Image (tube, coloured by chain):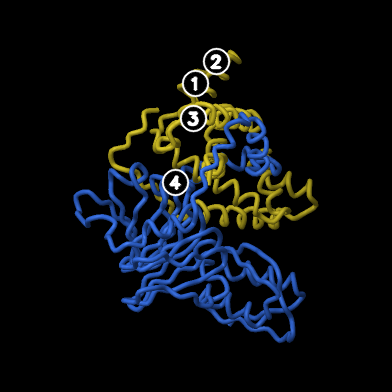
Amino acid sequence: MSRIGDFKDLFERHYRPLCMYAIHYLKDVEAAEDVVQDVFVAFWERNADANDSRAYLYRMTRNKCIDIIRKNGHGKVQPEDVGGDISDEEAVNRSTVEANLWEAVSRLPHGRRELLLMSKRDGMTYEEIANAKGLSVNTVRNQIARALNALRKERDRIIDFVLAFFAIPTF
Amino acid sequence: MKEIQDEHLNFVARHFEPGALRTREAWRRVKKRLTSTRFNYGYILAVSAVAAALAIGVFLFNSDSHSSTTVSAGTVARTVILPDNTIAVLAPESSVSFHQKRFAHKDRDVRMTGKVYFDVSRREYLPFRIEASDALVTVLGTHFQVTVTEDATLVDVVEGKVSLAASSALSEGLVLTDEMHAELLRGAPAPSLVSAGSLNPAAWATHRFIYNDTPLEDVLEDLGACFGCKLTCDAIGRRLTGEFRADTVREAITVVEDALGVKIDLL
């Protein structure tokens, strides 16, 4: 039992949700991973109090993302716009749901997943996908529907956050 | 309505990359960057210290409703994340309670009823302790399940290390590690090791199944028990070794059929 053991556990629980959170700001998965890894290293070095670790990690992640957005001079896009109108609690909840969904997507059968991504990620129509893969439009539609059903079931799995009443993380 | 609800789903699908967000790899990278001098803070808590310190007949906290928070599951299982990042999966009609102010700060003591699967987050110096009827379960970071019935408190450890004792006990508790099972009969002074009630007792919460040279008939019985159905197969003398995840009985059937090249019937 050691500090590194606790830290590893913290990392394993929060890494993906924090990456999802950062992707909302940076729109880039690789950049998000870099930021979150930097945040964990900084957290370790600051020897921060474990009790507020979740709030701390999210706050640091958001700050780093905002710095990057400002530095890249996206001009008209202000970091406040990117954050959206959600509360901090909702951000943590959302990140956890999204991390679970990412895991669920990675568990989809390869073929079905590819069709889903061609539709949702690449913006292809069912006809375009059918042509590209040599399948009927119906098959494409069915496969994507099945993928979406599996993902919706995962999303609807009820996960509650039970927060201690008095702890109001200051983000 | 569906569009709003699909927002998270669409976001994930838009950005998904198969090789990305690999937690283990990321951990390896981060670990390399940590200042090496800080590793060697080894505080080794002897297991006996863990067990002995807590197997004393004290109720962990008053059931003063003003200061304790209770989470319960109704007719459907419910997953909750406690303030210390521990994940608790409550079977229907089960509950978990803890002290509002102290939990995750001064202690990690909870009281539970029913059946709860725990994935306890690691926290140095703050052992996770569960009062389960008249049993005391002590944990430092692990995956396990506690069931409280009228007759006994049962503990199934999936992975990690757990100590089980009667709250009235004056001696060390029984230490359980991976895939061990024990029960404390109501009123008994000490727990005893038992064989598992089923091969994968926590599968209802984890959706993970592990078989080790298990006869197919036993695999089907185990899956049937978990999913509440009956599975049969004509093949004889087959055995299964492996670990897989399945959220539905059909998924499980597919895995076993593919692995063994057999045909399974769902009744």
Q: Residues within 10 Å of mark 1 (few under 14, many from 20)?
A: many
Visible in this render: residue B262?
yes
Q: Which residue is mark 1?
A: A79
Q: In the picture, which chain is blue? A: B
Spatial CA distance of label 3 from label 4 is 18 Å
The kind of secondary structure element at disc 1 is helix
Q: In the picture, which chain is yellow? A: A
Q: Is residue B171 left or right of residue A149?
A: left
Residue toward you, A114 or A46: A46
Callout 3 touching callout 2 (CB < 8 Å): no
The verdict on a common chain for dots 4 and 2 is no
Visible in this render: residue B9?
no
Residue B156: percent from left, percent from top? 49, 68
Q: Which residue is mark 4?
A: B85
Type of the residue with mark 1: Pro
Foreground tag (3 vs 2): 3
Type of the residue with mark 2: Arg
Q: Which residue is mark 2?
A: A70
Q: Which mark identifies residue B213?
A: none
Residue toward you, B218 or A11: A11
Q: Residues within 10 Å of mark 4 (few under 14, many from 20)?
A: many
Chain designation of label 4: B
Foreground tag (4 vs 2): 4
In the displayed structure, B256 sits above or below A19; it is: below
